[in-house]
Amino acid sequence: MNENLFASFITPMMFGLPLVTLIVLFPSLLFPTSSRLVNNRLISLQQWMLQLVSKQMMSIHNPKGQTWALMLMSLILFIGSTNLLGLLPHSFTPTTQLSMNLGMAIPLWAGAVITGFRNKTKASLAHFLPQGTPTPLIPMLVIIETISLFIQPVALAVRLTANITAGHLLIHLIGGATLALMSINTTTALITFIILILLTVLEFAVAMIQAYVFTLLVSLYLHDNT
Amino acid sequence: MDLDHASPLCGAGMESDCLLVRAHREAFALIEIMAGPEADAQFHFTGIKKYFNSYTLTGRMNCVLATYGSIALIVLYFKLRSKKTPAVKAT
């Protein structure tokens, strides 16, 4: 078991060809599109969910910020569906790869920051100094705020990677422990199995919450800059 | 973007915005009131404090630019100084 602990995080290959592209594109097949005015139950449910999420997330934005609605809705759907699909046994989760999460976080954060500097240069620069700072602390606080700005995309990516990876590892470990304990002590194995069930439920929640948190933070960075 | 439909999470007879959305709106409105350009008029600084302070938008921007400029000058000074004085003098 120990030597296979990180096997699920290796990018899958088939006959020397990487399957990552197919895996990343696969969740889009699960969201059907429709050209009808009145749709079937699945598409109606999907549209209701999208409307709920977009209203929750986009109502705080001005019209300029709301131009990002499609991007943010696509982001939350993609991360949410990828995380949930990763909970299937023996599947590969692209969001466990830091490279992928950095590839999502950095362009979105940079886009928001550059939008802010282009449209509200004065306010964006003034943002580096909190209002009411005592004079001797000004240089230090400017440096601290600059560092905290550049840490934002790294924190976004690492938060998602760490949460999903940790959850998968825990499930793997506790599942292995349950199997090992079955031949030793059935009662302990049963308790471990109950813990595994609870952990799986938690991981379902974490998968959706992390998608929401990622998108919400990008939305907040956008709000600060529009 | 039209977001006028009532959220399914809110009960009938309530406003169309959920509590969470209203709380977000109020929080961001407060931030905008505190830090907007219209709030600069309430401060009356004179002298150098008119351009470098941590209350008005202009003052904060100038402080930030001055900090970055100082850091750039310090880095430039050390770079130029190390080019002028060689590590080992030829004899």
Image (cartoon, coloured by chain):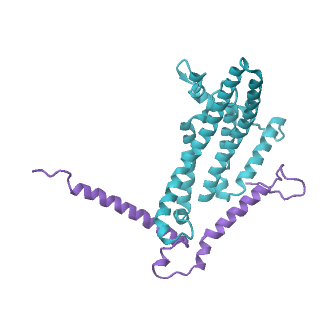
Chain colours: A cyan, B purple
Residue B73 percent coordinates (x, y): 35, 63
User: Quadrant where the N terminus of chain A lies?
Assistant: top right
The answer to whether residue A55 shows anywhere in this view is: yes
Q: How many marks?
A: 0
Q: What residue do we see at 61% from left, 54% from top?
A: A222
Q: What residue do we see at 55% from left, 41% from top?
A: A102
As rendered, which of A72 and A80 lies closer to the eye?
A: A80
Vertical comparison of A186 with A58: above or below: above
The answer to whether residue A73 shows anywhere in this view is: no
User: Quadrant where the C terminus of chain A lies?
Assistant: bottom right
Residue B22 percent coordinates (x, y): 76, 59
Vertical comparison of B32 with A58: above or below: below
Q: What residue do we see at 77% from left, 48% from top?
A: A52
Q: What residue do we see at 70% from left, 53% from top?
A: A58
Residue A107 percent coordinates (x, y): 55, 46
As rendered, which of A187 and A144 lies closer to the eye?
A: A187
Residue reaching furthest to the left: B91
Residue B91 left/right relative to A95 = left
Residue A194 percent coordinates (x, y): 77, 30
Q: Quadrant of residue A160?
A: top right
Q: Quadrant of residue B76?
A: bottom left
As rendered, which of A71 and B12 lies closer to the eye?
A: B12
